[in-house]
Image: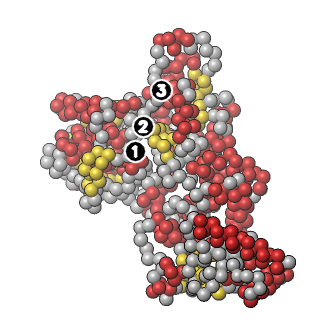
């Protein structure tokens, strides 16, 4: 029997040899000393005997046996050689009692190169074993900014806690996400039971995933597992039939993870208001579209919720008896998933979830109910089954910055930002560029309410002699004074408003509903094959500005000119030569993706983006959901 196995293994080796040669790849085992600095080999760290994944054993330490095996570790030597005799003896030993002696390997970038035990690896790979015991010497690569090296050092941090070495990811921050989905902090030590349970769950998931076609994807098993955990949770990884069903439901979301640019940002609406003829023809239509709005808070306590509620009332008035709308409040006080299920049970065709905090529940509902159109008000979310929508507030910030710069004279101005999340950094930079455009000498001092209170931040501005402050996009519900809203001026008589941005959620929702009615929404979804993020602005009428009499008429004319130019697609806040705080020059017209993902500040900003540990608890929870990558990467729990 071992002889038959050897012949079969030899055929596999010869096939691998032909494939490698035809594709221009080196057909034999890679040799570690050929592609790393030899000095590194002398400074390895012995980490003892551990169990390592056989699939990650990819080569040998030296040239001695490198061409005895094909690249897949299958044997190339003829059957009448001493080598084949030893291979067959190991095969017999494995069948009778198992291979128990550990091999010796060097580990580099979570790949293993055999110093002693090549034939043992070959036999176990032939029989499809998952792992082998090995005495490991780890070679650390020099730290640099490449994705591969950064991922490897994230893996090492994860390994220190978990002692799990068989899961890999293609995106930074994934190991921290995995810990979070497993209910652990990023530095929590795993127990032996934790490792055994996770190993069982992982390999069960992997089996189903690969049976479904996962081997054809460029993304890793770990990438797919994160998608699964994000939607269905760790507790559901215990039944093969159920996993198979859920992977089928999730497949488009899993496939999306292999895309380097998974998000398709839509800057303009495809819908148009119906003409008179369309209205007349639709009078007799009996089908009523039911639309639900699910909010995380109540309009009596949240201006954000109040604005979306006004949008719901607006579309109900515009569409009349052609739609029915309903609102659900305080979803986060109970189970948001149950509230969405209730809305679906009540036959709502469209569901708007109006807060990023509702995204996990909305995503799971969208996967389980593809017949319902579910959207979430957030930005830069790479989910295939749920579309997101947000407004280009940075356009308004740019105009407000120009107003501030024109009124500042020889003084500097202040900017009070809430959270370092997607879109907010663009708002800071757009405001600063607006200031710079009309007042090149003025500085913009940046403070964060997610680090300390707005009151303390404004006091810092006062001590610097700053009187012009750009603050929150929404006033706090119940506040009698609205001076913290928009651009304000500190005077001897108190803080007064100058200009405020206005979110026109009614216009946004009307256009979105029309998109869905006229099928353009579905067409965009089918044609895109990516995650749709609607990111509309002034040209769509979803953002406007309002001024008070405190703004001189000449400056209002400038602001109106800028707004008209932005609406006509003639003015771009992020076009031309832009310099960062570090002096780096950015030339050209930034793409929507670059604007959304900004993690740098322009040269005239005094201040910095806070690190994770500086944030308040509310700030941390918000950043966990939609924070910019550079802040999340610094997270230490």
In this view of the protein, can residue 622 be seen by the observer? no
Foreground: 166 or 491? Answer: 166
> Is 97 above or below relative to 502?
below
Task: Provide residue 609's location: percent of width, then percent of height.
Answer: 36, 57
Foreground: 436 or 191? Answer: 436
Residue found at x 16% / y 51%: 441
Compute the Cα span from label 1 to label 3.
Answer: 21 Å
Residue 329, quarter of the rendered image? top right
Residue 51, quarter of the rendered image? bottom right
Q: Which residue lies under the disc numbered 2?
A: 267
- Kind of element beneath mark 3: loop
> Is 352 above or below relative to 271?
below
Residue found at x 57% / y 85%: 63
Q: Which residue lies under the disc numbered 3?
A: 271
Q: Which residue lies under the disc numbered 1?
A: 592
Compute the Cα span from label 1 to label 2.
Answer: 8 Å
- How did the renderer colour the structure? secondary structure
Sequence-wise first label, 1 or 2 = 2
Q: Residues within 10 Å of mark 1 (few under 14, many from 20)?
A: some
């Amino acid at each position: 029997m071992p002889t038959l196995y050897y012949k079969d293994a030899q055929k596999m080796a010869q096939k691998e040899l032909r494939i490698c040669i035809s594709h221009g790849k080196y057909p034999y085992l890679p040799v570690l000393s050929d592609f790393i600095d030899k000095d590194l080999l002398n400074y390895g760290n012995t980490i003892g005997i551990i169990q390592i994944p056989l699939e990650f054993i990819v080569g040998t330490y030296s040239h001695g046996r490198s061409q005895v095996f094909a690249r897949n570790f299958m044997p190339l030597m003829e059957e009448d050689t001493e080598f084949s005799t030893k291979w067959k003896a190991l095969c017999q030993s494995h069948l009778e009692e198992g291979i128990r002696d550990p091999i010796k390997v060097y580990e580099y970038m979570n790949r293993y190169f055999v110093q002693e035990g090549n034939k043992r690896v070959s036999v176990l790979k032939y029989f499809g074993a998952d792992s082998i015991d090995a005495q490991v010497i780890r070679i650390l690569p020099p730290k640099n900014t490449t994705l591969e090296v950064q991922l490897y050092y994230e893996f090492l941090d994860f390994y220190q806690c978990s002692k799990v070495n068989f899961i890999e990811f293609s995106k930074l921050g994934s190991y921290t996400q995995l810990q979070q989905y497993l209910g652990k902090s990023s530095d929590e030590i795993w127990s032996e039971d934790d490792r055994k349970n996770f190993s069982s769950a992982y390999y069960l998931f992997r089996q189903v995933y690969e049976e479904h076609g996962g081997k054809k994807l460029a993304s890793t098993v770990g990438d797919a597992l994160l998608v699964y955990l994000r939607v269905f949770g760790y507790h559901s990884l215990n039944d093969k039939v159920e996993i198979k069903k859920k992977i089928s439901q999730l497949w488009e979301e899993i496939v999306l993870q292999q895309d380097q640019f998974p998000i398709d940002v839509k800057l303009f609406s495809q819908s148009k208001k119906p003409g008179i003829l369309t209205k007349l023809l639709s009078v007799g239509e009996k089908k009523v579209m039911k639309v639900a709005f699910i909010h995380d808070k109540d309009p009596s306590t949240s201006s954000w919720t109040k604005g979306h509620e006004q949008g719901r009332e607006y579309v109900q008035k515009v569409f009349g008896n052609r739609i029915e709308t309903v609102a659900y409040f305080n979803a986060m006080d109970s189970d948001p998933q149950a509230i969405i299920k209730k809305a679906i049970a009540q036959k709502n065709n469209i569901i708007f979830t109006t807060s990023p905090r509702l995204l996990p529940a909305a995503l799971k509902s969208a996967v389980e109910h593809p017949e319902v159109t579910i959207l979430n008000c957030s930005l830069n979310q790479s989910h295939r089954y749920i579309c997101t929508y947000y407004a280009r507030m940075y356009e308004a910030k740019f105009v407000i910055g120009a107003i501030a710069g024109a009124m500042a004279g020889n003084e500097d101005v202040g900017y009070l930002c809430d959270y370092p999340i997607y879109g907010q950094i663009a708002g800071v930079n757009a405001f600063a560029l607006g200031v710079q455009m009309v007042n090149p000498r003025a500085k913009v001092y940046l403070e964060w309410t997610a680090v300390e209170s707005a009151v303390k931040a404004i006091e810092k501005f006062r001590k610097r002699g700053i009187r012009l402050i750009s603050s929150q996009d929404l006033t706090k519900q119940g506040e009698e004074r609205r001076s913290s809203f928009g651009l304000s001026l500190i005077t001897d008589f108190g803080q007064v408003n100058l200009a405020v941005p206005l979110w026109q959620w009614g216009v946004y929702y009307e256009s979105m509903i029309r998109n869905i009615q006229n099928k353009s929404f579905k067409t965009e979804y089918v044609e895109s094959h990516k995650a749709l993020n609607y990111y509309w602005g002034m040209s769509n009428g979803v953002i406007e500005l309002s001024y008070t009499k405190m703004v001189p008429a000449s400056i209002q004319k400038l602001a109106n000119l800028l707004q008209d130019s932005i609406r006509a697609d003639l003015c771009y806040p992020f076009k031309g030569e832009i310099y960062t705080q570090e002096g780096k020059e950015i030339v050209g017209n930034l793409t929507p993706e670059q604007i959304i993902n900004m993690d740098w500040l322009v040269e005239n900003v005094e201040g910095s983006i806070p690190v994770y540990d500086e944030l308040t608890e509310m700030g941390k929870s918000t950043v966990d959901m939609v924070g910019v990558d550079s802040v999340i990467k610094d997270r230490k729990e």
